[in-house]
Amino acid sequence: MGFAERYGPWAVISGASEGTGRAFAQQVAASGIHCILIARREAPLAELAEQIRGDSGVECIYASVDLSLPDAFEKIIAVVGDREVGLFINNAGADANGSHFLNKDVDSWISMLNRNLITSLRCTHHFAGLMRQRKKGGLLFVGSGAGWGGGPFMAAYSGAKAFDLCFTESLWAELKSYNVDVLHLVLTITDTPALRQLLADKKQPLPSRMAPPEKVASVGLAHLGRGPHYNWGQLLGLRAGWRRLRVRLVGAYSQKIFGAG
C-alpha cells in the first residue's frame, strides 16, 4: 500500500504556517494527499496553500484557528466537514514563554496547555476514531526531548511533552491491530522561526547546530509506520525499541486486569 493510499485522501496538519509544519504540509502534498492547514496566522497559511496547489496539484484548504482557545476543536471540525482524514499531524505546541513557572501568570500556562494538549487530544479522539472504523490511517505527534524529563524554564512545557510521549505510545499499542500507525517524533533543537524569535527575545545566540525542518519532516514521515517513537538526535531517554518492548509488556499485563477495554 502506497503512502497516499494508506494515509489519504486528506491530511490535517496543525501549526502549518511555518517551520516543521510547513515542511510536513509540502511533503505530504507532494505524496498526493490533499491538505487541510491549521494555524493561527492566516496570511502565511494562504500563501502556503496557494504554493501547494501550484506545486503538487492537490487540493489544499486552510483555517485560521487559535489552538489555545476553547472553540478551536469545533473550528477545525467545521473546516474539515465530511472530508475523509487519513493523516493527522499534530505539529503545534511550542512554548513561547521561556520562563520559570511562577514568573508568569497562570493563564499563560493554561493557554500553552490548551494549545499543546487539550485541542490535540480532542482532535485525536475524533480523527483516530474514524481511522479505527476504516482500519487505516496515521497519527504523527511532533514532540520534544523536554518530554524525557523536567528542568528549569520548562516545568509546564516538559510536563505537556511527557504527556504526549506516554499518550502516543499508548495509542500505538491500542490502534496497531486496527492498522492505524502512531508515531511520536522526538526533536532536538530545530531551526524554526519560533525558536529564532524566542532566542532573539532572550538576546541569546543561535545554536551552532540545528536540525533543518525539511529533514525533520522527511524522517518523521518515513518512520510513521515504525512507532511508537523516533528520536531525532536525543541522547537521553530509552531507545525506541526498548520503549516498544515496555509498552507491549505493560499491555499484556493490563489486558489481564482490564480485559478488552
Image: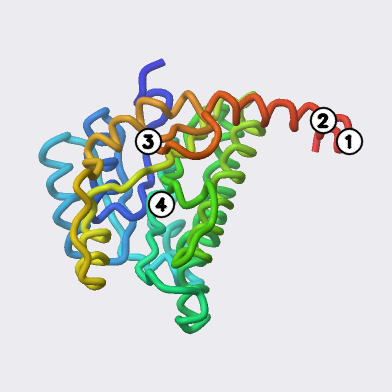
Q: On the image, which quarter does residue 212 sit in?
A: top left
Q: Which mark is residue 80?
A: 4
Q: Residue beneath label 2, please?
A: 253
* Disc 2 secondary structure class: helix
**Mark 1 element type:** helix
Where is residue 176 shown, x and y percent of the image?
61, 26
Say what amino acid the circle numbered 1 marks.
Ile
Q: CA distance from mark 3 to mark 4?
A: 31 Å
> CA–CA distance between discs 1 and 3?
35 Å
What type is the residue that disc 4 sits on? Val
Q: Nearer the viewer, residue 217 or 153?
A: 153
Q: Amino acid at mark 2?
A: Tyr
Look at discs 1 and 4 and give the one toward the viewer.
1
Quadrant (top left/top right/bottom left/bottom right) for the N terminus: top left
Most foreground residue, 56 or 25: 25
For marks 1 and 2, give the one nearer the viewer.
2
